[in-house]
Image (cartoon, helix red, strand yellow):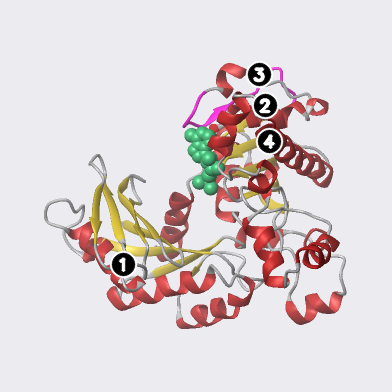
Amino acid sequence: MNILVINCGSSSLKFQLINSETEAVLAKGICERIGIDGSRIVYQPEGGQKIITESPMPDHTQAIKLVLDSLTDTETGVVKSLDEIGAVGHRLVHGGEKFASSTIITDEVIAAVTECNELAPLHNPANLIGIDACKKLMPTTPMVGVFDTAFHQTMPEEAFLYGIPYEYYKKYKIRRYGFHGTSHSYVSKRTAEILEKPYDQLKTIVCHLGNGASVCAVKNGKSVDTSMGLTPLQGVIMGTRSGDIDPAIMEYIAKKENLDIDGVMDVLNKKSGVLGLSEFTSDFRDLEDAVLAGREDAIRAMKVFAYSVAKYIGSYVAAMNGVDAIVFTAGLGENNKYVRTDICDYLGYLGIELNQEANAKRGMDIVISTPDSKTAVLVVPTNEELAIARETLALVK
Ligand code: AMP
């Protein structure tokens, strides 16, 4: 069966068509600037060149129509008709406490996801628009929702409750939810396969380090703690997000800079992290170049970043009473050997020894620790689209 995987944001829409038997990506691409001037679709069939077409996309329905037209195009398409698309898998960001696993999308599910919109006001409404657009254009094709939060619903109470009045949890469901769950689940499962150990007997710490970054403790196949919280602002410092800070800093900045709450949130979400610390970039590639050139501002940002990740790893060793494997994934985790080294330099107490030759490789599943290392360290490229396709297949079968 061919499965169309959709990751719908407010002004962009990423897609992949995956053959579920071979797991080959038949085509992939992105619609950019939806609802804005200059919208375009980038479409790439398997083994072919990228085709970039500028085309007006006033809304997401038009964007999905262009995706379906590209997939069925007589020259560059990869299927003859929409009948060859057996199901659609949607990435959904926030399922609150309502969804502990992926689900077939029904009207009831749409209503329940809509109730979670308050928890992810930037993401969930966009995800729902993608569902609506697919419903209009492919009304009989089954759809599945795969939630970023679902994998973390196994966290125990002591990990998900905050030390604030319990009534806020009861009234407003304020608690830690965690994100990147599809990635943490995929990468931790893959780690068990690579190490040839049973997934349900392994203690893994997954470091998903991209522009957004989170660390997750996976014990015996279940997420038991993760660094992001009610929102993706909590946890390790990120490209532009502050991660953990003393909450009183918010009031202090507001008074000093004469900002309202929205202004402070803007600083913490968009002007902090390594961007705020380096004062010049949120992009870890630029930072890496600047660190190699000896720039103090970049070195400062990278040091704080690596330290914040290492502290989370330490706390999850405590939470799981040990660790078998530490795994790096996502844009930075997969590609930056220096940051992996800097983080592992803090972890000597775990008996970690890196194999720098393996650590320098890219784009593959690889164990980067030496055979003598007491804890295994791996790089596992994440593949959220494939994980969504697998979940979708399992539910529609
Ligand atoms: P993601 O959010 O997973 O797409 O990751 C984005 C972050 O990963 C950005 O800060 C990039 O600079 C970084 N990144 C992506 N590719 C590379 C690369 N080849 N080398 C170093 N950093 C990279």
Q: Secondary structure at mark 3?
A: loop
Judging by the rendered image, the residue that carries numbered circle 3 is: 370
* 174 with respect to 42 (left or right): right
In the image, the residue with mark 3 has its CB under 8 Å from the nearest atom of ligand 1: no
Residues at discs 3 and 4 in contact (Cβ within 8 Å): no
Compare marks 2 and 4 and give the one earlier in the sequence.
Answer: 4
Compare marks 3 and 2 and give the one earlier in the sequence.
Answer: 2
Question: How far across and down, in percent of the image, does residue 167 sit?
Answer: 84, 79
Compare marks 2 and 1 and give the one earlier in the sequence.
Answer: 1
Residue 14, image quadrant: bottom left
Q: Which residue is at a point 63% across and 74% down the rendered structure image? A: 98
Q: Secondary structure at mark 2?
A: helix
Pair 3/2: label in front: 2
Q: Secondary structure at mark 4?
A: helix
Q: Is residue 65 above or below residue 195?
A: below
Q: Is residue 328 above or below residue 70?
A: above
Compare marks 3 and 1 and give the one earlier in the sequence.
Answer: 1
Compare marks 4 and 1 and give the one earlier in the sequence.
Answer: 1
Residue 147 in magenta?
no
Judging by the rendered image, the residue that carries numbered circle 1 is: 64
* 146 with respect to 20 (left or right): right
Residue 61, image quadrant: bottom left
The range drawn in magenta is 361-374
Q: Residues within 10 Å of mark 2 (few under 14, many from 20)?
A: some
Judging by the rendered image, the residue that carries numbered circle 4 is: 297
- The disc at residue 341 is 2
The amino acid type found where label 2 is placed reads Thr
